[in-house]
Image (cartoon, rainbow, N blue to C red):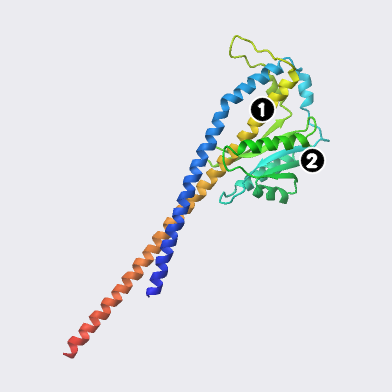
Amino acid sequence: MSDTMESLRRKINSAGELQSVVRTMKALAASSIGQYERSVDALTDYYRTVQLGLGACLRARESPHHAAERNRPDATLENTAIVFGSDQGLVGQFNDAVADYAVKTLTTLPGKSQVWAVGERVHGRLADAGLSLLGLFAVPNSVQAIIPLVGQIQVESESHRRAHMPLWVFHNRPVSGALYEPVSQRLLPLDAQWERGLAKTPWPTTNLPEVVGSGIATLRTLVREYLFISLFRACAESLASENTSRLAAMERADKNITELQEQLRGAFHQLRQSSIDEELFDVISGFEALSGSR
């Protein structure tokens, strides 16, 4: 009897220790979500500045006809894509969702597709789907680590891409009312309609802009900044979604542990009460036996 009670006591203590770990992970996930969301918000003003600069360069760069020709799909070219996933577990269907979405989208595009994966787990799922993989990047563990990753992705993509080769990015994005949703964006070539919209964007002041030096060099620099912002945002939103999924998993685990603790405590108290009842019964039986002998 005592061994069983001791076993239940150990299980209750173990459940309490596990719950402490789970709640710590919940706090870390919630904190991480906040820092990644703030990093995305911090890009807003800078992205607006880059858009204004692109608009100034695009106004006299080329006609809409040329832009439409540049954006026409070419079945002979290969699509390159970057898929942001996770390196760690406890994220539910996070990697499956973005991998399935990427595979479904890329298979509908003309030409072949080759992919860079950010995260070992999504890399494995893309490989299982039969996609041609160019490489694997480690998932950053902080906002500060996103910048080196984006720089590395830009270097690798520029070394593999040919002119007018489409460049896509796939990632999970947080949404209200749900954990996340997989989304995609074609980063290059620049969309013709998007370019026309930028070219028509009015300048916010009466001092009209002037492109100093080579217009092509300035445009390329601004396009690199646009790519940097887009990739940084995709990575930060993916990390926020990952931690949102982990937070939901930890909340479910916390709830399950609480229910298990209640069951264990109930069983322990019931077993303890049974032990007390048996001891009282033995005392009463002994007393009645002594009284009868007298």
Residue 154 placement (x, y as % from top left):
70, 34
The span from disc 1 to disc 2 (Cα, nearest Å) is 27 Å
- Residue 293 visible in the snapshot: yes
Q: Residues within 10 Å of mark 2 (few under 14, many from 20)?
A: some
Task: Please tell me the numbered disc located at residue 252.
Answer: none
Residue 139 position, x and y percent, is 62, 44
Pick out the residue farthest to the right: 76
The amino acid type of the residue labelled 1 equals Glu
Which SS class for mark 2?
loop
Up/down of 48 relative to 250, above or below: above
Name which residue lies at 41% across and 67% down.
Answer: 8
Q: Residue at x 44, y 58 (%)?
A: 17
Residue 209 in the image: above or below residue 86: above
**Tag 2: residue type?**
Lys
1 or 2: tag closer to the N-terminus: 2
Secondary structure beneath dot 1 equals helix
Return the residue found at the far bottom.
Answer: 293
The spot of residue 122 in percent (x, y) is 66, 47
Q: Which residue is mark 2?
A: 112
Would you call the spot at circle 1 few (<14 residues within 10 Å), some (14-19), or many (20 or more)?
A: some
Instruction: Check disc 1 and report the residue beneath it.
Output: 225
Q: Nearer the viewer, mark 1 or mark 2?
A: 1
